[in-house]
Image: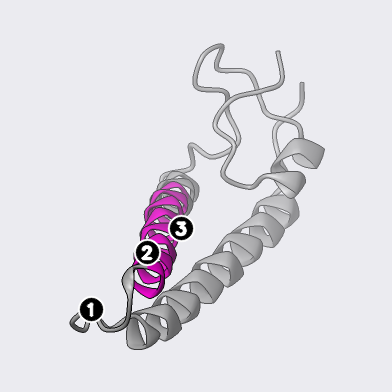
Amino acid sequence: MKKLTSLQIKSLKNKLQEEKMKFLILKKVTSENFILDEKKGDEVDNANEEYYRTEVLRFRNRDALYLKKIEKALLKIQQDEYGFCYYCSESIKYERLLARPTADCCIR
C-alpha cells in the first residue's frame, strides 16, 4: 500500500479539527443545559429525569472517548506517524481514513 500524500493528510487533519470543534461546542452546550437540581415531582417524573441524566452521561462518556481518539490522531499527524496500522504497520487506505479519520488499524 502507498503512503498518504501531504494533501490527503492535510484534508484529514482539517476533518479531525472540525470534528474536534464540533464536539467541544456540543460539550459546552450540553454542560450548560445539564444542571443537577433536587428531585421534584412524583416517582414517575423522578424516574424519567434519572433515565434522562443516565443517557446524557452515557453520551458524554462516549464523546469524551471519541475526543481522545481525535487528539491521538492529531498527535500522530504532528509526529508523522498517522495513517499506519497499529497491528501490521502497513498504510491505512485513504478511503478508510476519510470514512473514519480516527482509525488506527487497517481493515485486515
Asked if the stretch drawn in magenta spans residue 103, the answer is: no
- Depth order, front residue of 17/90: 17
Q: Which residue is mark 3?
A: 59
Say above or below: 9 vs 30: above
Give whichever of discs 3 and 2 has the lower sequence position.
Answer: 2
Q: Mark 1 or 3, which is nearer the eye?
A: 1
Q: Quadrant of residue 29?
A: bottom left
Instruction: Give the position of the C terminus as an image quadrant.
Output: top right
Is 20 displayed left or right of 38 in the figure?
Answer: right
- What amino acid type is highlighted by mark number 3? Phe
Is disc 3 surrounded by few (<14), some (14 to 19) or many (20+) residues within 10 Å?
few
Q: Which residue is mark 2?
A: 47
Q: Disc 2 on helix, strand or loop? A: helix
Q: Disc 3 on helix, strand or loop? A: helix
The residue sitting at 57% across, 23% down in the picture is: 85
For residue 39, the mark is 1
Give the alpha-carbon distance from disc 3 to disc 2, as whole Å.
18 Å
Give the alpha-carbon distance from disc 1 to disc 2, as whole Å.
10 Å
Give whichever of discs 1 and 2 has the lower sequence position.
Answer: 1
Is disc 2 surrounded by few (<14), some (14 to 19) or many (20+) residues within 10 Å?
few
Is disc 1 surrounded by few (<14), some (14 to 19) or many (20+) residues within 10 Å?
few
Say above or below: 70 vs 27: above
- What amino acid type is highlighted by mark number 2? Ala
Is 80 displayed left or right of 11 in the figure?
Answer: left
Q: Which residues are magenta?
A: 44-69
- Depth order, front residue of 106/6: 106
Is 28 displayed left or right of 1 in the figure?
Answer: left
The residue sitting at 75% across, 46% down in the picture is: 99
Q: Are marks 1 and 3 in contact (CB under 8 Å)?
A: no
Counting from the top left corner in percent of width and height, residue 64 is at 38, 56
The residue sitting at 70% across, 32% down in the picture is: 3
Counting from the top left corner in percent of width and height, residue 38 is at 18, 82
